[in-house]
Image (cartoon, helix red, strand yellow):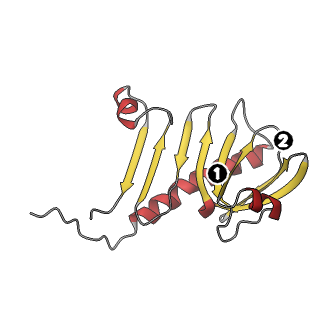
Amino acid sequence: MTDDTPESLIPYDEIVQEALRAVVGRVLTSVATQGGLPGGHHFYITFRTRHPGVDIPAHLVERFPEEMTIVIQHRFWDLEVDDQGFSVGLSFGGVPSSLRVPFGAVTDFVDPAVEFSLKFQASDDIEIETTDAPDRPAAEASEDGSNVVAVDFTKKK
């Protein structure tokens, strides 16, 4: 036996990322359909500002040339979701702005009200971690019986 793992002909990393990003879409669709956030839920959504399909005002790209995090909580409007991404109206420094974000640009989705987090890292070595307790290590979280899913698609070299 060797330590060399054969290269997969099935793109598992892409399939898992797509499925987890669909969770973001489903949650945002629910909020858009209901016309607001239920209870104390709110979201921090981090995305790559220069990803193809991202449409945000130029001053935001200048201020956040790589990534930015938006908060969907009290003051947002025109939330629309489709299969490719979402658009939303938010204010930045009192200036209303419309943003269009494809799901492929999203790198983090967090609902701190219930300690739920999805993290997406695009690189040659892809690691996706889902946990209901983002501040605790996965080993500690699993010992107390909480729901933790960790998927690691790192390549052995």
Q: Which mark is residue 97?
A: none
- Place of residue 140 in the rendered image (x, y in percent of width and height, measured from the top left): 37, 30
- Place of residue 80 in the rendered image (x, y in percent of width and height, measured from the top left): 77, 56
* Residue 133 to residue 9: above or below: above
- How dense is the environment of label 1, judged by Cα within 10 Å: few (below 14), some, or many (20 and up)? some
Work out which residue is located at the far top of the displayed protein and give it.
144
- Place of residue 23 in the rendered image (x, y in percent of width and height, measured from the top left): 57, 51
* Residue 65 to residue 78: above or below: below
Taking the spot 71% from the left edge, 66% from the top edge, the residue there is 54
Residue that numbered label 2 is attached to: 75
Taking the spot 41% from the left edge, 35% from the top edge, the residue there is 137
Q: CA distance from mark 2 to mark 1?
A: 17 Å
- Place of residue 108 in the rendered image (x, y in percent of width and height, measured from the top left): 58, 49
Whether residue 91 appears in this view of the structure is: yes
Taking the spot 74% from the left edge, 43% from the top edge, the residue there is 72
Q: Which mark is residue 46?
A: 1
Work out which residue is located at the far bottom of the displayed protein and give it.
9
Q: Secondary structure at mark 2?
A: loop
Of 118 and 50, which appears nearest the observer?
50
Amino acid under disc 1: Thr
Quadrant of residue 8 within the rendered picture: bottom left
Quadrant of residue 143 within the rendered picture: top left
Q: Is residue 53 left or right of residue 58?
A: left
Q: Quadrant of the N terminus?
A: bottom left
Which badge, 2 or 1, is on the more N-terminal residue?
A: 1
* Residue 27 to residue 102: above or below: above
* Residue 84 to residue 24: above or below: below
Amino acid under disc 2: Arg
Q: Is residue 1 left or right of residue 40?
A: left
Q: Are marks 2 and 1 in contact (CB under 8 Å)?
A: no
Counting every numbered tag in the picture gives 2
Tag in front: 2 or 1: 1
